[in-house]
Image (cartoon, rainbow, N blue to C red):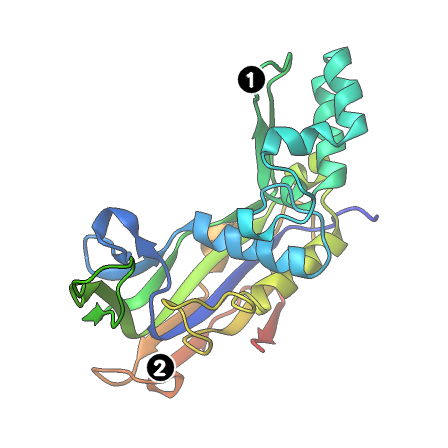
Amino acid sequence: MGAFTNKIDFEVVIMVNHGNPNGDPLNGNRPREDFDGFGEISDVCLKRKIRNRLQDMGEKIFIQSEERCDDGCKSLADRTKTNDEMQKALKAKDNEAYAKAACKTWIDVRAFGQVFAFKGNSVSVGVRGPVTIQSAFSVDPIDIESIQITKSVNSETSDKRGADTMGMKHRVNFAMYTVKGSINHQLAEKTGFSDEDAEKIKEALRTLFENDASSARPDGSMEVVRVYWWKHNCPMGQYSSAKVHRLLKIEKKTEFPKSIDDYEFTLNSLPGLEVEIIEGI
C-alpha cells in the first residue's frame, strides 16, 4: 500500500426529500436542528454510513453495527482478541505496535482513529485518524412535517382491540445539506492511511446512502448530489481547510425550494488549487 501524498479537503452536497436524515432521540426522533432552525446530521451518523459503505466494498471495519457484524465478534474487545499481532503487542505492553497492528487491519481505525481501552488490558491506546468530518448542516432552515401513525392489529393476543395510535413520525419536506471534511497528511503518515484509502473514502461519500434505506429514510429520499474534492499540491496544503471550505456557495433562488434546480451553486477558486467534482450516483 502506497503512502498518502498531499492534503485533501472535501465537501458533499446532500438532498433530502421527505425523509428524516438524522433523528434526535432526545427530541422524539425529530430531525436534528440547531437553535436557528437549520437541519443537522451529526458527524457520528455520517461516519456510521461511511463505515457501512466501506464494509459493502469489502473493507475490514472495526466499529461494526450489530446487524452488520461479519466476523462473529460480539464486542470490540472480542474483535481485538482475534488479531494476533495486537495480542502479542498487548503482552509486550508495546503501545506503538498495538496501534500499528490495529491500523493495518481496519480501514476505519487508520481513517478515523480509535481509543482502545478495555477492562483487564494492560495498555490503553489512542489513535488519531487523519480523516475529520464536520456535522452536516442545511443551507436553509428546515420545514419539519409530523404525522400520526396507527396500527391495525394487536401486538399481543387479546379479546380487546388495542389502541390504534402508535406514535408520531417526522420528516423533512425538502432541504439541501452540506458536509465538510479534510484528510491530514501528518496523521495519515502515522496511521498508514494511503492515497488508495482516500479513493475509497471518496467512493463511500459518493454512494453514501446506498443500502441505507429505512422507514424514516425510504429509498430515494436521501441523495448525494455531488462531491467536491480538493487535493493540494503539497503535503501540508497550500491553504487552510477553512478557506477551502468557503469556496462553495449555495443559495436558494425561490422562497420555498422543492428541487435542486431551485438552488444556485457558485464555486470560487484559489490559485494553484484544483477541484474534482464527482456527481452522485
Q: Nearer the viewer, residue 187 or 172?
A: 172
The quadrant in which the C terminus is found is bottom right
Q: Amino acid at mark 1?
A: Lys
Query: Please, which residue is most extreme toward the right here?
Result: 1
Residue at the image point whose x is 64% and y is 50% from the top? 7
Left or right for 129, reference 192: left
| Residue 28 point in image, percent of width and height | 22, 54
Label at residue 263:
2
Q: Is residue 231 visible to us here?
A: no
Q: Nearer the viewer, residue 84 or 254?
A: 84
Residue at the extreme front of the image, as rendered: 159
Horizontal side, residue 220 vs residue 183: left or right: left
Whether residue 164 is visible, yes or no, is yes
As displayed, is residue 1 above or below residue 142?
Answer: above
The x and y percentages for residue 81 are: 71, 27
258 to 24, vertically: above or below? below
Image point (25%, 72%), residue name: 152
Q: CA distance from mark 2 to mark 1?
A: 52 Å
**Tag of residue 119:** 1
Secondary element at image label 1: loop
Question: Is tag 2's residue or tag 1's residue first in the polypeptide sequence?
Answer: 1
**Is the Cβ of the residue at disc 2 closer than 8 Å to that at disc 1?**
no
